[in-house]
Amino acid sequence: MTTAAVGVRDRTPVRHRAPGTELAAPEHRGSTDIADRVVEKIAVGAVAEVDDAYGSARRLLGLRMPGATAPRVTVQIDGHLATVRVAMSVRYPAPIRQVTREVRTHVMERVSELTGLDVRHVDIEIPALITPERGRRVL
């Protein structure tokens, strides 16, 4: 049993343990499981942080529908390894290889930083290029 008290001078918590209640070694304390869905949301946020990377365009019966969407991300976790698949759009005329390289690196870094998982592979699909919206021309 652990009780917490607050130091009078510096207001830092002071921990007191009941006799005979020692903590187990870290490798024997258990594990934290992270759901695939959580890693997917982290990866979606990481894609959004890269310039010129956008969500995948919505399509209905082969026609592109208006409105921005988030990139489609799926994740498979096996132990401490994660594999990420991303479907996203790139703003035209940005260099696709450079944008995908930045997305791949950023997703790997953010997922590793926030979850502790080792991302070995990020597969990226670019189903569409986004052109800049042009204003109306009045003649």
Image (cartoon, helix red, strand yellow):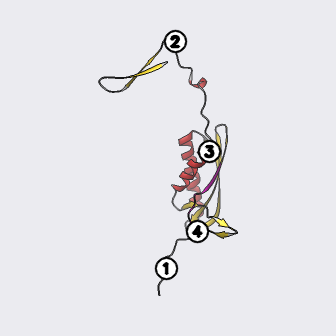
**Label located before the other in sequence (2 or 3):** 2
From the image, tell me which residue sits under label 2.
20
What is the three-letter code of the residue carrying label 4?
Answer: Pro
Check disc 4: other Cα within 10 Å, few if <14, some if 14-19, many if 20+.
Answer: few
Task: Relative to 130, say whether 14 is above or below.
Answer: above
Check disc 3: other Cα within 10 Å, few if <14, some if 14-19, many if 20+.
Answer: many
Residue 72 within the magenta-colored segment of the rendering: yes
What is the three-letter code of the residue carrying label 3?
Answer: Val
Q: What residue sits 65% from the left and 66% below the top?
A: 59
Q: Residue furthest left?
A: 9
Q: Position of residue 70 (x, y in %)?
A: 57, 57
From the image, tell me which residue sits under label 3.
119
What is the three-letter code of the residue carrying label 2?
Answer: Gly
Q: What residue sits 52% from the left and 12% below the top?
A: 20
Q: What residue sits 56% from the left and 42% below the top?
A: 112
Q: What residue sits 53% from the left and 56% below the top?
A: 48
**Label located before the other in sequence (1 or 2):** 2
How far apart are the alpha carbons under marks 2 and 3? 41 Å
